[in-house]
Image (cartoon, rainbow, N blue to C red):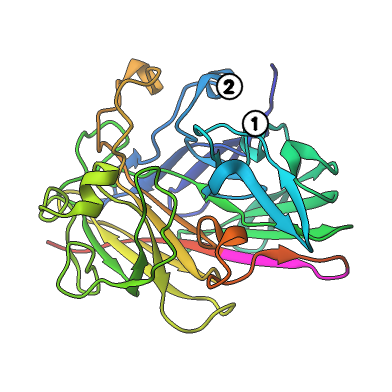
Amino acid sequence: MTADVFTLANATGMVVRFAAYGGVIMSMHVPDRNGVVADIAPGYDTPDDYERDGRYFGALIGRYANRIAGARIRVDGVEHQLDRNDGANQLHGGHHGFHNTVWAVEPFTRAGESGAVLSFESPAGDQGFPGKLSTRAMYTLTDGNAFSIDFSAATDAATPVSVTQHAYFNLAGHDAGSIADHELLLNADLFTPVRADLIPTGEVRSVKNTAFDFTSSRSIGGVIDCDDEQLRIAGGFDHNFVLRAGERSLRHAATVYEPTSGRVLEILTTEPGVQFYSGNGLAGGPLGKGGFDYPRRGAFALETQHFPDSPNQPEFPTTILRPGVELSSRTVWQFSTRAR
């Protein structure tokens, strides 16, 4: 496979490299509090390496981010069998989802920013989903160290859609080891518990007085090994958090701070949820950049998206996109630093 690689750079030293294959963000170089630039995005050296990746490093995800129970959906009374790639379930759109596709890429530059528009047309029946889906994802890097992902999509038949960018981060550097010292704040009072196969039970539960309470900033390592049934099921965090009111408006979702480097990542989104994954299954995969062996919990992901299994959970916000309606989704990663 041959896929082009593109570079976005700004006036303050931030550089992002991504590939047409899967739209994967291959590297993200960001300054620390002393101005020292490091790559904070785990991944691989070449686009070809991502074909063997089972961890979705830096990839665009669709048609449906996260899990769908039994790989089955019902749309307007018609049942559709989807591609199974996670036991009996579907994960991140199936074996040949957006992550496993070569996107068309059109770079652009504007005053104070540079970026690219990525586009892909998924035919009706792709991975079992009804309707043809035309999707665009726009990457934009500003001189203010903000990186945004703007999705739009349209369909010719009713179909569920939930898209995300599956970047992993280690704000100390992609090869720095554990993310236990990272401090996380989530703008969420509720989360959706899961059963043994990580499918939501349908309950929406308060985070109060639990290990899931990140309404005030605290270290991931300080709570990840608490005696909690939900943490035991997932081997750490792999849960959807319900963001506070303001659906479809761009609002604060999360802030992550790494004390050694001083790097801060603030996430804003229009999506109703964010999946916090603490890298529980990173170990044992293919070697990463420079031959680095990424360890368990060596990176985290905060995937802004709709709730997992929403097509089978009528109490969750709907994800059905219909003809004549355009899906619009925006997420911003704002990078900065803090003094000691």
Under mark 2, the amino acid is Glu
Mark 2, residue position: 51
Can the viewer see residue 104 in this picture? no
329 falls in the magenta region: yes
* Range shown magenta: 324-330
Name the secondary structure under disc 1. Answer: helix
Name the secondary structure under disc 2. Answer: helix
Q: Nearer the viewer, residue 135 or 259?
A: 135
Residue under the image location 75 percent in, 64 percent down: 321
Residue under the image location 55 percent in, 63 percent down: 306
Answer with mark 1 or mark 2, whichever residue precedes in sequence: 2
Please state if 224 lies on the left or on the right of 31 as rendered: left
Quadrant into which the N terminus falls:
top right
Instruction: Kindly check if marks 1 and 2 are in contact, taking CB atoms under 8 A apart as contact.
Output: yes
Mark 1, residue position: 100
Residue 56 position, x and y percent, is 50, 35
Residue 11 position, x and y percent, is 50, 54
Q: Residue furthest bottom?
A: 245
